[in-house]
Amino acid sequence: MRITAHAAAETQSFPTLSKLHISREAMLHNVRLIRSQLPLGTKVCAMVKADAYGHGADLVVDTLCNFEFEGLPSPAVDQLGVATLDEASALPQMLPILVLRPIESFYIAEQREAIESAIAFGWILNVQTVGAVDDLAKLAMRVGRAAKLHVMIDTGMTREGCPPEMLSVLLTRISAYQSLQLVSVGTHFASADEPESAFVAGQFGRFVATIDGTIDKLAPGVLRHVSNSGATFLAPRTHLDMVRPGISLYGIDPTGQPNRNRALRPIAKWTAPILAIQNCPRGTSVGYGQTWTAQRDTRIGLLPIGYADGYVRNLSSKGIVLHGKTPLPVVGRVSMDQITIDLENVPGAQVGDEITLLDNDPLSPVSAYALAQMSGTIPYEVFTRIGPRVKRVAVEQ
Ligand SMILES: *Cc1c(COP(=O)(O)O)cnc(C)c1O
């Protein structure tokens, strides 16, 4: 018998040392805060692409679909948004799923089976070219079910989407096929994280003008949606029929700074235990390249996470972790699987003590905001790079 690595892993349950604790309550609190910004009846498409921004799509979608919270009904949202067909197929099929990556003719042949099952599942597919529309119409006929389509209009992001002047042609083509059903149109803002952004106003104006110019081709019931988290909170004019929040669901303020007036609650806390402690006399160097040397006698704690887990290497001798409330410095290079911390400020620290790498308190020195700042990125990237070895666990079962 051939034993695959996968089979071997299934027969044993290894304890995981490093965990990403996900609070369902905090998440539903955030949904409620988002809903409180919206007129009644405005729908919410929860963006759960990239494994729910690294938080674990299974857990996040389970929370959104199966839990009630302080008057928020279940499911808490109306639609789920992902980037790829693979991401869509990994989700429970409970709510409409919007797949953002545009379907393009050049790969339709190669992905025919995946796209046919996407049509059969009723996922909403994003199209931006007449060629893709024609190809999808044919596949939908083979499947025997109308393909649901979304059209993104590029109003200034210069990324995906159909140019405004092409919309009319595209919609005419879609309506020519019985096997296609247009369910939504949208656009995406380039700078919705800035309050009062003139660029957002310009993009929104272009979107509305483009839609108005083709209104005869939009069947009633076609949803118009444009707002990411930034626009949901900062540009209420843009809410239209549905909003598409991502980062705010996970409790991060769209401005990238904690905001006391908008009490979003970060839903993730990343911890790892101290795996070992070494006594380090003054003058001892730590880690690859001897980049850090003890200036005094101290104790060095070893944590079982490294850059392969998303604790980036540029936090070498720069990162901070928490023992309880006490901040401790990361010393020496971040390795692939391990980091080392200076325990001088917690003489009582022991092997097994839980250390916080990423805190769910927005004002913590190791909040996602702070970690992003320390490592020169944004909270989105802090979350999405947390690797698969870190187990996602629910705080509330
Ligand atoms: C990721 C994404 C969103 C969500 O953006 P946030 O800034 O995380 O709220 C909305 N719309 C589209 C098209 C996206 O790709």
Image (cartoon, rainbow, N blue to C red):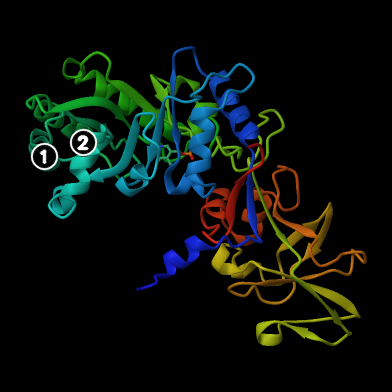
Alpha carbon distance from label 1 to label 2: 8 Å
Quickly name the residue at label 1: 139
> Is residue 24 something one can see in this rendering?
yes
For the residue marked with disc 1, what is the amino acid? Leu
Q: Which residue is drawn at 63% across and 60% down?
A: 15
Considering the image in quadrants, where does the C terminus appear?
Answer: top right
| Residue 284 picture location, percent across and down | 82, 86
| Residue 109 picture location, percent across and down | 12, 52
Q: Residue at x 78, y 57 (%)?
A: 322
Q: How crowded is mark 1: few (under 14 residues within 10 Å), some or many (20 or more)?
A: many
Q: Which residue is drawn at 26% across and 34% down?
A: 121
**In what element is the residue under mark 2?**
helix
For the residue marked with disc 2, what is the amino acid? Ile
User: Which numbered disc covers residue 119?
Assistant: 2
User: Which numbered disc covers residue 346?
Assistant: none
* Vertical arrangement, residue 13 with respect to residue 149, above or below: below
Q: In this view, does 105 lie to the left or right of 161?
A: left
Residues at discs 1 and 2 in contact (Cβ within 8 Å): yes
| Residue 364 picture location, percent across and down | 75, 47
Q: How crowded is mark 2: few (under 14 residues within 10 Å), some or many (20 or more)?
A: many
Quarter of the displayed picture in which ligand 1 can be seen: top left
Sequence order check, earlier mark of 1 and 2: 2
Q: Quadrant of residue 47?
A: top left
> Is residue 159 something one can see in this rendering?
no
Q: In which quarter of the image is residue 288?
A: bottom right
Q: Residue at x 32, y 41 (%)?
A: 100
Considering the image in quadrants, where does the N terminus appear?
Answer: bottom left
| Residue 137 picture location, percent across and down | 10, 35
Q: In this view, does 395 lie to the left or right of 129?
A: right
Q: In which quarter of the image is residue 346?
A: bottom right
* Vertical arrangement, residue 19 with respect to residue 314, above or below: above
